[in-house]
Image (cartoon, rainbow, N blue to C red):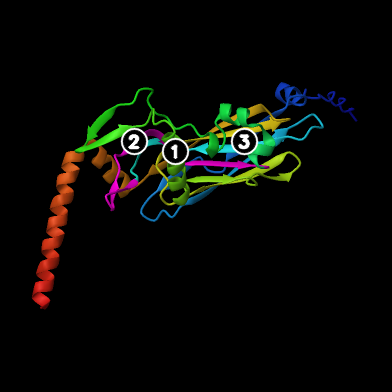
């Protein structure tokens, strides 16, 4: 009977360099359950889960802050003013770069995580939200209406800025949740991003900040796309590529609809 050869020696695979390197590194990693949201006629909003892990080799606790910012778009405001006993609209004010969507979620209130200066420098929180405006004020005419572009409104600037935030919050487009980030296990966290029905389409950018002792230690950047699909997308693209033709077709369609309705009701009467 022939003897079997001895088994080969066991080979121990070395640990990956990446795993070894993260054991002593304080950082955060995050991802989205869905990085693309499709908007059609039946869209009623979306709820996306942002999840991640905190690698913390120290005994010091760390906080997580999630910031999601939607595409910037101009926003036009007017103020009701009383003149000679009559309420009239003031001259319009145009902010050129207000985010269409903005939310923050954190493990604790932001004021407990970092000081005012740190939050302002990073632009974290609606109180520190950067709303772009040109350096020099100018007046432009659009569709026969004179708009004032915000730049040097003096003390009134803060009032106009607060009005932008108030209107966006009323439409559920701006939100602050001081307990929106929840640790589900040691080092593992989750947060929900709620998109309302009126959420603008385009690229959304998410920042996941890791704070320790009031200082930012790490950040993870994510991208979310909200886009129209189906017939809604075709109409949207047609309206932006050929606005004049789109306007003419809308007028013709409205006229035909009105004419058809009048004919139907005239026959019934």
Marks 3/1: CA–CA distance: 32 Å
Q: CA distance from mark 2 to mark 3?
A: 36 Å
Task: Tell which of 95 and 201 is nearer to you.
Answer: 95
Q: Circle 3 is placed at which residue position?
A: 30
Residue 53 in view: no
The residue identified by callout 1 is: 161
**Residue bounds of the magenta highlight:** 80-108
Q: Earlier in the sequence, mark 3 or mark 1?
A: 3
Task: Reply yes or no: does residue 212 show up in magenta.
Answer: no
Q: Which residue is mark 2?
A: 94
Q: Residues within 10 Å of mark 1 (few under 14, many from 20)?
A: some
Query: Circle 3: is it few (<14), some (14-19), or many (20+) Cα within 10 Å?
Result: many
* Residue 73 percent across, percent down from the top left: 38, 36
Q: Quadrant of residue 65?
A: top right
Which of the marked residues, 2 or 3, is nearer the chain's N terminus? 3
Question: Viewed as shown, does residue 222 lie left or right of 37?
Answer: right
Q: Which of pointers 2 and 1 lies earlier in the amino acid sequence?
A: 2
Residue 133: give x, y in percent of width and height: 39, 28
Q: Residue at x 12, y 58 (%)?
A: 256
Residue 257 on image: x %, y %: 15, 60
Main secondary-structure element of the magenta-colored stretch: strand
Q: Are marks 3 and 1 in contact (CB under 8 Å)?
A: no
Q: Horizontal and vertical percent for residue 63?
A: 70, 36
Residue at left offset 24%, top offset 42%: 239
Residue 62, picture quadrant? top right
Screen quadrant of the N terminus: top right
């Amino acid at each position: 009977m022939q003897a079997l050869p001895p088994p080969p020696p066991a080979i121990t695979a070395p640990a990956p360099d990446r795993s070894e390197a993260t054991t002593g590194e304080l950082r955060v990693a995050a991802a989205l359950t869905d990085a693309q949201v499709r908007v059609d006629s039946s869209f009623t909003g979306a709820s996306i889960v942002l999840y991640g892990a905190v690698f913390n080799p120290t005994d010091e606790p760390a906080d997580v802050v999630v910031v999601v910012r939607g595409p910037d778009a101009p926003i036009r405001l007017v103020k009701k003013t009383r003149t000679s006993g009559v309420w009239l609209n003031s001259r319009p004010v145009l902010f050129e770069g207000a985010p269409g969507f903005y939310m923050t979620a954190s493990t604790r209130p932001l004021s407990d995580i970092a000081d005012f200066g740190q939050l302002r420098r990073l632009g974290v929180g609606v109180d520190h939200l950067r709303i772009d405006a040109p350096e020099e004020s100018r007046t432009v005419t659009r569709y026969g209406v004179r708009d004032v572009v915000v730049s040097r409104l003096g003390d009134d600037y803060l009032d106009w800025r607060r009005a932008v935030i108030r209107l966006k919050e009323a439409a559920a487009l701006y939100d602050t949740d001081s307990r929106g980030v929840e640790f589900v296990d040691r080092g593992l966290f989750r947060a929900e991003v709620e998109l309302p029905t009126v959420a603008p389409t385009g690229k959304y950018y998410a920042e996941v900040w890791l704070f320790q002792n009031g200082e930012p230690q790490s950040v993870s950047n994510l991208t979310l796309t909200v886009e129209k699909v189906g017939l809604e997308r075709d109409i949207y693209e047609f309206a932006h590529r050929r606005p004049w033709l789109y306007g003419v077709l809308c007028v013709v369609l409205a006229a035909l609809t009105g004419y058809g309705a009048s004919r139907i009701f005239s026959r019934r009467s």
